[in-house]
Image (cartoon, rainbow, N blue to C red):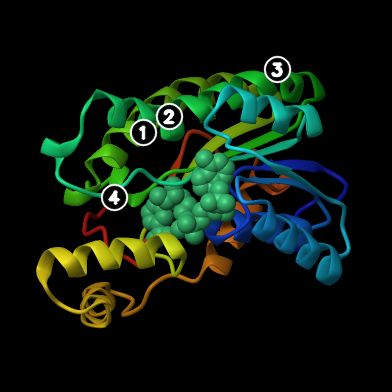
Amino acid sequence: MDLGIRGRTALVCAASKGLGRACAVALAQEGVSVTIVARGAEALEQTAQNIRDIIGVEVKTVAADITTPEGRQQALAVCPSPDILINNAGGPPPGDFREWDRDKWIAALEANMLTPIELIKATVDQMIARKFGRIVNITSSAVKAPIDILGLSNGARSGLTGFVAGIARKTVRHNVTINNLLPGPFETARLQHTLEVRARMSKLSVKDIATQERAMNPSGRFGNPEEFGATCAFLCSDKAGFITGQNILMDGGAYPGTF
Ligand code: NAP
């Protein structure tokens, strides 16, 4: 299927590795010029060069912390008016809620709620004026089914989800859609870190915890970031203009509800 977005531009946040990277690659494969953001310049440049070498589209890089006003300014200076915005940032640390003070909560809100809202605010009116825009927020399955040790994520991302539910119904009339993609367990550095924390807490090995978690998932496996990127690219396609305000769960069937 031709997704109909060749020649469009995308700002993909937190995209040197993992799910953000997979989204940037999938969009590039559809002929989208991507600007990718991450803090570490080395991995970022490597990913950019990889995409240029293999796919041959324009890739711009911004080495910055997207959760800071300066970082967002830097990203928007390089890609001021994207057709496609992929909001993403590192997830908050796991732990026990008794250990989280106000500063930890503010950092989680900055990263996983306020940063995407700021970036939507900075780009959505130009999308509306052009009558095309696709915004995808990478959130988490924790929004639908909270994960005990990820309370900071459960809380901050639910705030973003509530906000998006409201505005996504206002922009779609102008062919600007806003959706959330909710990853369950995907094979990335972040998942590895979560498994390590679980292993420490349970006194099992990381390998045993991973085997247990794979077995518990109805699919019997973890997700592949490529699958995530492909879904993101479809949501950004010109075929997906009638999908807005949705929370699309990719978790191998782990969420047990009928809806
Ligand atoms: P990952 O493999 O650790 O990759 C994170 C990427 O984000 C890296 O490129 C990292 O580069 C960049 N990044 C992190 N913080 C940043 C910041 N402040 N500013 C700019 N770039 C930043 O993580 P992932 O698994 O792809 O996860 C992506 C998001 O999905 C996270 O919020 C995570 O909590 C959520 N999630 C993941 C899973 C999963 O199973 N993988 C499940 C549920 C939710 P630098 O470190 O160099 O900045």
Residue matched to label 3: 125
User: In the rendered image, which quarter contains the N terminus?
Assistant: bottom right
The residue sitting at 22% across, 41% down in the picture is 151
Q: Amino acid at mark 4?
A: Phe
Residue matched to label 4: 259
* In front: label 1 or label 3: 1
Q: Amino acid at mark 3?
A: Asp
Q: Position of residue 72 (x, y in %)?
A: 64, 28
Tell me the number on the disc at residue 42: none
**Mark-to-mark CA distance, 1 and 3:** 26 Å
Is residue 25 rendered to the left or right of residue 207?
right
**Mark-to-mark CA distance, 2 and 1:** 8 Å
Q: Front-most of 4 and 208?
A: 208
Tell whether label 3 touches label 4 (CB within 8 Å): no
Residue matched to label 2: 113
Residue matched to label 1: 108
**Mark-to-mark CA distance, 4 and 3:** 33 Å
Residue 134 position by quadrant = top right
Q: Position of residue 32 (x, y in %)?
A: 80, 50
* In front: label 1 or label 4: 1
Closer to the chain start, of discs 2 and 1, is 1
Closer to the chain start, of discs 4 and 3, is 3
Q: Amino acid at mark 2?
A: Met
Q: Position of residue 6 (x, y in %)?
A: 85, 51
